[in-house]
Image: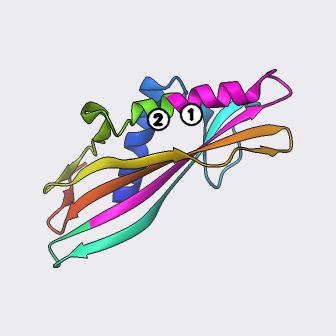
Amino acid sequence: MNIIESLRYAMRTRIVQHVGISEQEFQREWRDAPPGADCYIRETVMEYSREENFQTSELITVLCEYDVFIRDKVFPNPMAIASGIASKLLAEFNVKDPAKVDVALEGWTGGVSASVARYNYDSASQEEELFRLPVLIYVEIFFPMTAKYKG
């Protein structure tokens, strides 16, 4: 398995367990929104940068963007709902809480580790009848050259 896809799965699992968003309320970046969805998250997970350390390991920074979409014709105050979901996302991956900063990447051996480095909001926008509030979470993955996926 690809390390980026492992991170996507780990992040999504925590969000479903702790933020109150179901698996059906996720939209992967290139897919259509869930049918009939009035509230959903578009998930984009991509490599942001990569630094090699003397050919023994890499430090991979991954941008996990979670765009919270709220249909404004259904909810009277879409900004408040989107802000509430975004706040829960940031609370789940709080960089000030040592218990929440690490992200478990199941199945990887050889000292692979991942932790949230920073996060913030991006500019809110209105897209047709959808209110959008992006949440940006940057995760650093320490990836030794000896790392293997055992599944």
Q: Is residue 47 magenta?
A: no
User: Helix, strand or loop at disc 1?
Assistant: helix
Q: Is residue 74 left or right of residue 43?
A: right
The image position of residue 105, as x and y in percent, is: 28, 46
Judge whether 1 appears above or below 94 on screen.
below
What kind of residue is marked 2?
Leu
* Residue 100 location, quadrant: top left
Q: Is residue 75 magenta?
A: yes
Outermost residue, front side: 96
User: Helix, strand or loop at disc 2?
Assistant: helix
The image position of residue 110, as x and y in percent, is: 13, 57
| Observer-nearest of 59 and 39 | 59
For label 1, the residue is 86
- At x 77%, y 30%, the residue is 36
The image position of residue 96, as x and y in percent, is: 32, 36
The image position of residue 66, as x and y in percent, is: 56, 44
Outermost residue, bottom side: 54
Quick check: marks 1 and 2 in contact, CB under 8 Å?
Answer: yes
- At x 59%, y 25%, the residue is 84
Dividing the image into 4 quarters, which one contains the N terminus? bottom left
Judge whether 32 appears above or below 130 on screen.
below
Please provide the residue range marked out in magenta: 59-87
What kind of residue is marked 1?
Ala
For label 2, the residue is 90
Q: Name the image colouring.
A: rainbow
